Amino acid sequence: IQESLQQGESSAALWTGALAQLTPDRRRFLLRLVHESAIPALRMEVLLSAMNDPDADTARLASDYVQTGNAAGVPVLAEQLKRGKEPVRRLTVDTLGRLGPQTAGVADALQQALKDDSAWVRGAAAAWLLKFKTAEDQAMSALIDLLRKGKAEERVMAAAGLWAGGPKARATLEEAKPDDSLLASAAETLGRKGEEFIPDLLDLLRLNRPKAGAGAVKGLALSGVNGVWAMMEMTNTTAGRLREAVKPALALAGADVATPLAEILKNYQRDIRSL
């Protein structure tokens, strides 16, 4: 495959097929080869596909590679938002968001996504814009509309965006009296979006609503090692104090969060058993 790529004969389908047949560690190695490819269009197409990898580390690596300052990255992503199928557009809107408002073209692409046919994509774009404090009125209006009229997953996206969108947006969400199940799902959504939402997840954990807190614990674990450390620092950085502070939330989170927490903490020689 590497030789084919060097000869210009490889196609995105060939690479995607190879990704599907390899173990996660080999897929990540192959992604590094793709990332170093001299064919920008091929590189971006494969990386966008790999962002949907069932292995979380592989998907995150692909997302990181998309975000590493590639000058062609934003235009390609913006084009994906216009022409890609909905699953690709869903991945693309969050990848653009993670690039941040300081990256040229990101805010414009997200504002265009507010017109997307998919309510989920519109909600995701609005959530990022609200976080960036860009086109706030338009973004908040889109999220409120989804919260009131959207399907279940669209309401989750709306709740996530409003909770993380600043004091005014959060107050609007609280006025709607969301139940704990909706807040828990919104927290997991924020965790998958990335580390930018760790402060919002900690705020949700502080509500002392166990079911919502369970979602916040999951979200913090999904956000990565910094999310877990932030949760531990909130309880004076000791696993014992953490257990007592968020015991109800952890009990509800259960097995869903045990594996990512253990994986993160074992790298720092922490014992997960008491937790």
Image (cartoon, grey):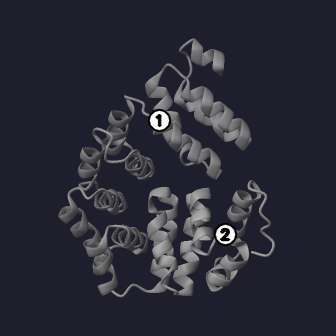
For label 2, the SS is helix
For the point 64% across and 77% down, which residue is it?
253
Which amino acid does the dot numbered 1 rest on? Thr
Residue 80 visible in the current orientation: yes
For the point 29% across and 62% down, which residue is it?
130
Q: Position of residue 243 (x, y in %)?
A: 69, 79
Q: Distance between the residues labelled 2 and 1?
A: 29 Å
Q: Which of 120 and 179 is in front in this view?
A: 179
Q: Where is residue 244 in the image (x, y as percent from the top left)?
A: 68, 84
Q: Mark 2 points at which residue?
A: 257
For the point 50% across and 81% down, which residue is it?
206
Which amino acid does the dot numbered 2 rest on? Val
Q: How many marks?
A: 2
Answer above or below: position of 218 versus 72: below
Answer above or below: position of 98 versus 133: above
Q: Position of residue 131 (x, y in %)?
A: 33, 60
Answer above or below: position of 81 versus 179: above
Q: Which of 210 and 44 is in front in this view?
A: 210
Please tell me the numbered disc located at residue 68: 1
For label 1, the SS is loop
**Horizontal side of residue 241 vs 89, given as left or right:** right
Answer above or below: position of 272 versus 31: below
Instruction: Decide: few, some or many residues near mark 1? Use Cα within 10 Å; few <14, some 14-19, many ≥20.
Output: few
